[in-house]
Amino acid sequence: MATLVSLDAWLKVWLYKSTFLLGFLTTLETAVFAVLLSLCLGLIFGLMSTSGRMLLQGIARVYVEFIQNTPLLLQICFLYYAMSFSGHSIGIITSGIISIGVYHGAYMAEVIRAGIQSIPRGQFEASYSQGFNYMGTMYYIILPQSIKIILPPMVNQVVNLIKNTSCLYIIGGSDLISITYSFVTGANTGGAHGPAYLVTGVLFFIICFPLSMLASTWENNLKKRERMTFTKAAAKPQEEA
């Protein structure tokens, strides 16, 4: 804690600010690509889970249960070292993007599945009666209605994904946490633990807090709309009477 009030420690952090910026940008890059991958996987397996076909539902269930019930650190280590030992190394950042994307894809799939299943079954039946197939029903009718339910928990998953980029530290990545650790243990930069980790925490906060507030705002707005809809629906019979 003494380093938090040490001017020399803060000057060290300022002197190496470009190092922290590099870690910050690497974390952002990893997060962006992992989010895209997780969204793609979430949509694919979410649709498979609600397809009504036993085989597709079974595959989606196995993916979700296996990924959710094994640690992310284990998945990162397994992918990175398995590929390295097999002679097909794909790099630390690529391993991180794939591992984190696949991990959060399982959670995205559950969010999308829950959102789709929240739509009354009659909407599906009405769509099929109009000649829409499953994909057409999802694209034109179900997903547009479920998006307001899906978005808040999906944004929360994005926030968790960004924080989980710190797991790349275990395989020696160049993300923000890894660079911070290298900084505080370096021969020339050691001794500035307090300021270094505080700056890292602030940088993560800058990314995650606005997204958390966005998810909270969306959720509150959704609840307000539902209350207003319920109030109007309850008042309509009284007006007609």
Image (tube, grey):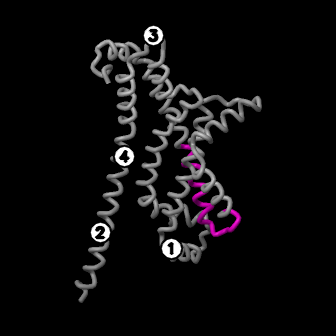
Rendering coords of residue 8 (x, y %)? 32, 12
- Quarter of the image with the N terminus is top left
Check disc 3: other Cα within 10 Å, few if <14, some if 14-19, many if 20+.
few
Confirm or deny contact between disc 4 and disc 1 (CB under 8 A). Answer: no
Check disc 4: other Cα within 10 Å, few if <14, some if 14-19, many if 20+.
many
Q: Earlier in the sequence, mark 2 or mark 3?
A: 3
Marks 2 and 3, how far apart at CA: 60 Å
Q: Earlier in the sequence, mark 3 or mark 4?
A: 3
To which residue does mark 1 refer?
123
To which residue does mark 4 refer?
212
Marks 3 and 4, how far apart at CA: 37 Å
Residue type highlighted by circle 4: Ser
Asked which secondary structure carries label 1, the reply is helix
Confirm or deny contact between disc 3 and disc 1 (CB under 8 A). Answer: no
Marks 4 and 2, how far apart at CA: 23 Å
Confirm or deny contact between disc 3 and disc 4 (CB under 8 A). Answer: no
Q: Residue at x 34, y 42 (%)?
A: 210
Asked which secondary structure carries label 3, the reply is loop
Asked which secondary structure carries label 4, the reply is helix
Return the mark for residue 227.
2
Confirm or deny contact between disc 2 and disc 3 (CB under 8 A). Answer: no
Q: Earlier in the sequence, mark 4 or mark 2?
A: 4
Highlighted range, magenta:
36-56
Marks 3 and 1, how far apart at CA: 65 Å
Q: Earlier in the sequence, mark 1 or mark 2?
A: 1
